[in-house]
Image (cartoon, rainbow, N blue to C red):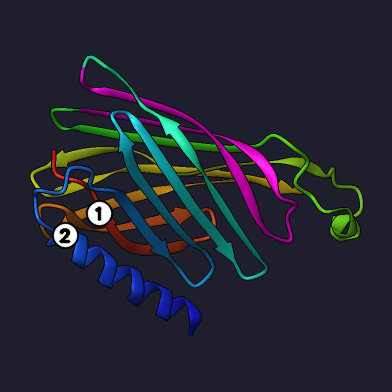
Amino acid sequence: MRQSQSLLLLLLILIALAGSAQAQEYLPEAEFVGSTEFRAASYIQPLWKHLSLEAHYYGVSRADLGIAGPSFEFRIKGHLKIAPGIGVGFGSPFRTSPVAMLRVGFEKDWLFAEYNFIASLRAAQLENQLEEVPPGEELIRYARLSDGDHVSYRWKRLQAGFSWEHISVRAESEWKTGFRVAVGLTRRLSFVSYTLFPEAEFRAGLRFTPEE
């Protein structure tokens, strides 16, 4: 129920942003996707020139993780964007920790690719959770997360391509690969979906991007 309410609230926010006046100088970039097992939300708000404030959320049935902090974007020849950042990660059952962030994007003609990486700079595993690690498996103290990565073919309002993610936390280091499809609903608002394997999982949501 809570997940449905969050999705409805984000939908209303994105619709409002999509219809906002073009006079707004700094429009944000935002994405929300979810499935029965996973939910994620990202919000990137430009502040001044290439400086932005980022906020990310990731959740599963037994854990919730939030990340927030500034990033600075470097542009190379107008096609490549590299945005390193530093922030703080917090949630349950994790310890509050400084984190390093990196966003990479490439757009040229029909090619559109994105890579996102977040890593804790402090042991994020709470000591009272150590007994939950299965016997014989090594504890991963520094959490790493790469989600929403893709290389896509773009044609008008359609995007389709290969997607992957890597989540490394506690005693789990899991890779998933699959397909990403995005369809533009308006100039700024798109429907986006991910189909990931080896255990088939379908995620769907909305993405808001400022008009170039």
Crowding near the residue tagged with mark 2, few <14, some 14–19, many ≥20 C-alpha atoms within 10 Å: some
Alpha-carbon span between mark 1 and mark 2: 7 Å
Q: Secondary structure at mark 2?
A: helix
Residue 96, x across and y down, in percent? 71, 50
Is most of the magenta stretch helix, strand or loop?
strand
> In the rendered view, would you say 102 is above or below 95?
above
Q: Which mark is on residue 142?
A: none
| Residue 133 in which image quadrant | bottom right
Q: Name the residue at 39% across, 43% down.
A: 163
Q: In the drawing, what numbered circle is on residue 18?
A: 2
For the question of whether residue 52 can be seen, the reply is yes
User: Which residue is more in the foreground, 136 or 61?
Assistant: 61
Q: Are marks 1 and 2 in contact (CB under 8 Å)?
A: yes
Q: Is residue 66 left or right of residue 170?
A: left
Relative horizontal placement of residue 129, taking residue 100 as reference (left or right): right
- Density class for disc 1 (Cα within 10 Å; few <14, some 14-19, many ≥20) is many
Q: Choose top left, top right, bottom left or bottom right for residue 25.
A: top left
Identity of the residue drawn at 85% across and 59% down: 129
Instruction: State the residue at coordinates (12%, 62%).
Output: 19
Q: Secondary structure at mark 1?
A: strand
Name the residue at 33% across, 53% down: 30
Query: x, y percentage for residue 59?
Result: 56, 63
- What residue type is disc 1 on? Phe
> What segment is highlighted magenta in the picture?
78-107
Instruction: Please state if 162 lies on the left or on the right of 117 as rendered.
Output: left
**Is residue 134 something one can see in this rendering?**
no
Is residue 79 depicted above or below 3 in this figure?
Answer: above
**Splitting the image into 4 quarters, where does residue 41 fall?**
bottom left
Q: Position of residue 5 (x, y in %)?
A: 41, 80
Q: Which residue is mark 1?
A: 208
Residue furthest bottom as drawn: 1
